[in-house]
Amino acid sequence: MKLRRRLGIEWAGVALVASLVVIALIYWNSLSGFDNLLYDRLSDVDRPEASEEILIIAIDEDSLARFGKWPWSRQRHAELLDILADAQPKAVAFDILLSEPGNADEDAALAEAAAKNENLFLPLHFVFPGTNGAEFDIKEPILPLRQSVADVGHVNLQFDRDGVVRRTTLCFVGTQETSDSKEIVWPHLMEQIYRSAFGKSSAVYDRSDNCEQPLLMPFASRGSFSQIAYAAVVDGEIPAAFLQDKIILVGATAQGLGDQHPVPLGDGGTMAGVEIMANMLNDIQADQFITPASPSFHIILSLIPTWILLIGFWRWRPRTTIFVSLALVGIIFATSVLLLSFEIWLAPGAALVGLALVYPIWGWRRLQATSDFMGDELKNYRSETPDIPVLQAPLGPVDLVTEQAEELAHAIKYVRDLRRFISDALTNLPDPMFITGLDGQVKFVNKLAQTGFEDGAQDLALNDMLARFVSPTDLGDVKDYLALDQQAREHDYVDFTSTSDQVFAMRRARVLSDEGELRGHIHYLADITAVANAAQEREEVLQLLSHDMRSPQAAILALLDGQDATDSNKRIEDHARRTLALADNFVGLARIKSSEFSGEDILLSDLVIEANDSLWPLAKQRGIKSRVDDQSDGAFIVGEPSSLYRSFVNLIDNAIKYSPDNGEISLLLRKINLDRQPFVSVTIADQGDGIAADMLDQLFERFASDDSEAKGIVKGAGLGLNFVAAVIERHGGTISAENVRKGGARFTILLPLAPDPAEAEQ
């Protein structure tokens, strides 16, 4: 339990740390480098086809050679726009920033040419941070152009941490610094082109709850889009029919113009901004953007493999765990690929880190906990078994865990030998014995309990075992005994006769674990056949004493009744009565030793008075007065009436016997408290010569009587006082004897007061 509890705490700690690390990695996008690299490789597998409607008019190296260095005059751009107006394309995106005014005549000419194109769109650009504390500045086309074109759209690029353009947004939302500070939405230039070309907003824009959400762009292969030189169009080398119904994007592609950016094509090259715009428009048109998984969805899917492995740690073997870990790595990659085919990107980095974190940390903590546990247990083992030699040092240096494992193997070998020793000892016990578990099944049977069972007794149900071993007449008593909750009792066993007519005494003992938990029971059967036979013979002897030896004495007393009271007759009568009393006392002693106490409520004063009255004729013959002083206030005790009655008869008879003629015997009953316990005290005092000093210490021992001087000092009462002492002790009381200063002997009996019925009910 100690190891399980610590492992549970360690496991919970590892699970918490791993989960928090995975969540933190996703929240802060800490593994973007790995995730982006994997995304780039997967994107190479299936790149989209370029739309034939998209045409790039490129400001390339040939155009720069033809018209001179950049920037060109705005009159040159006016010439291009005039040609495009005549060609009637679907839409034109002029991806050149014209945010600063130039020559007034050229600006006017350019605005006039722009006005001829009904579907012409110009870019605007946001600069972060803005001036004078503003969040951003807006770089719009000069006012004449802004008023001449259909609309504008933003062209800001989204750069990942590695500087690569993979993502874009369909709009930019910001608050323009005006008097009312109203929030404004600027759609992307390519979204504006799509709306102009197809007369509606794009499907991806319509279903998006937030047009600012970054979307991953699948890139077509480099150079996939149709492209013609700017100079070729201006020089009239391109027929108007070729430009008709095209979506035209005008932009710089020459390397020296600074509009080249890294893209995830896997070749490490850059791509012109206008071609990036073409890819975005292609994705808008085909509705094939890749949507990154939402943070909550990403966290849940990333934690699932980690928790599968965490739960598996409790169920799987280490070999299974490593294979499952490798399988989970494959499943993580497969899940990312599968979701990517549904245009959802689940970055696998955090999930992989979760697995990579959990496996070694849990292995370390489990090994540490196990090592500590083995160290403590081996320390306890060595302290509890000092007779076992300490394990020899291993050959060559080894690590701590290996050393503990070797010592544990030694301890297991010792326990195995000890188990074999105990098994052999139990198997060869001189009496039958079997062990049952909590399920009532017999788990172990020694040789004598197995004897006679050809099919074996192990794994039998307890009732089946008893039915085979115990005679039908005693089976009920044995089951009643086993049904009791075993407590410390005077006779914690049951006698029964076996099916082979042997007599056994059955005891049951609990089998407890080191923590005190009940694990089963041991049933030990002692063969008491000889003892039972001896008890039977003793009972027959008791019957002989109580009947056959009493009968002659009773006959003698009957013959003497009515005869002359001569000295001879009186002596014969005394000896007969003495023999009869000895027989009664002997039988009484034997029976109270062999039977269980069975008491009832007795009014003690009535019992004492009755015993005193029964001896009144004997006292009257000698003129002895016997007075009873009852101060017990009707005290009850729990006792056996017959044995108590005979005990008081013996004591009163002794008092009469050893009192002088015309003497007096006093009997005093009263309640007293000793150590806060209520008792009833009975004092019997006579006026005789008292008890010999050398007999006081052995007065209540068996055969301590010496009646050689009937009228001399009392020296004992033989079996009579021994019987009285046994009865009083049986009732939980005490008896004592002393000599009174004024002469005579005094016997004091203390018996526990019966509990109040009202208190007993409570």
Image (spheres, rainbow, N blue to C red):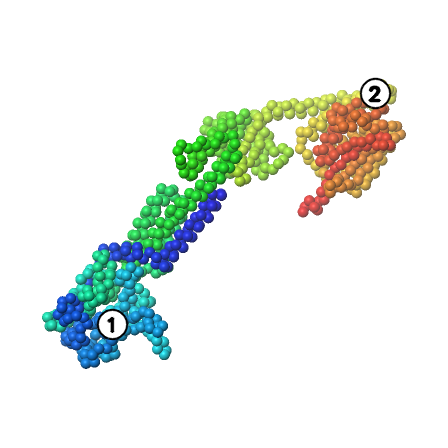
Question: Which residue of the protein is positioned furthest toward the front in this rendering?
Answer: 69
Q: Which one is nearer the viewer's eye here, 365 or 206?
A: 365
List the residue tagged with mark 1. 123
Figure check: 228 above or below 750: below
Figure check: 433 above or below 106: above
Q: Are marks 1 and 2 in contact (CB under 8 Å)?
A: no
716 with respect to 109 (left or right)? right
The amino acid marked with disc number 1 is Pro
The amino acid marked with disc number 2 is Arg
Figure check: 187 above or below 638: below
Question: Which residue of the protein is positioned furthest toward the top in this rendering?
Answer: 568
- Mark 2: secondary structure: helix
Marks counted in the figure total 2
Figure check: 720 above or below 157: above
Q: Which one is nearer the viewer's eye here, 318 or 586?
A: 318
Please name the residue shown 83% across and 22% down the image.
709
Mark 1 or mark 2: whose residue is earlier in sequence:
1
Residue 606 in view (yes/no): no
Please name the residue shown 33% across and 54% down the image.
349
Residue 583 in which image quadrant:
top right
Q: Position of residue 571 (x, y in %)?
A: 83, 20
List the residue tagged with mark 2. 571
Residue 761 in view (yes/no): yes
Residue mark closest to the camera, 1 vs 2: 1
Please name the residue shown 59% across and 26% down the image.
528
120 with respect to 350 (left or right)? left
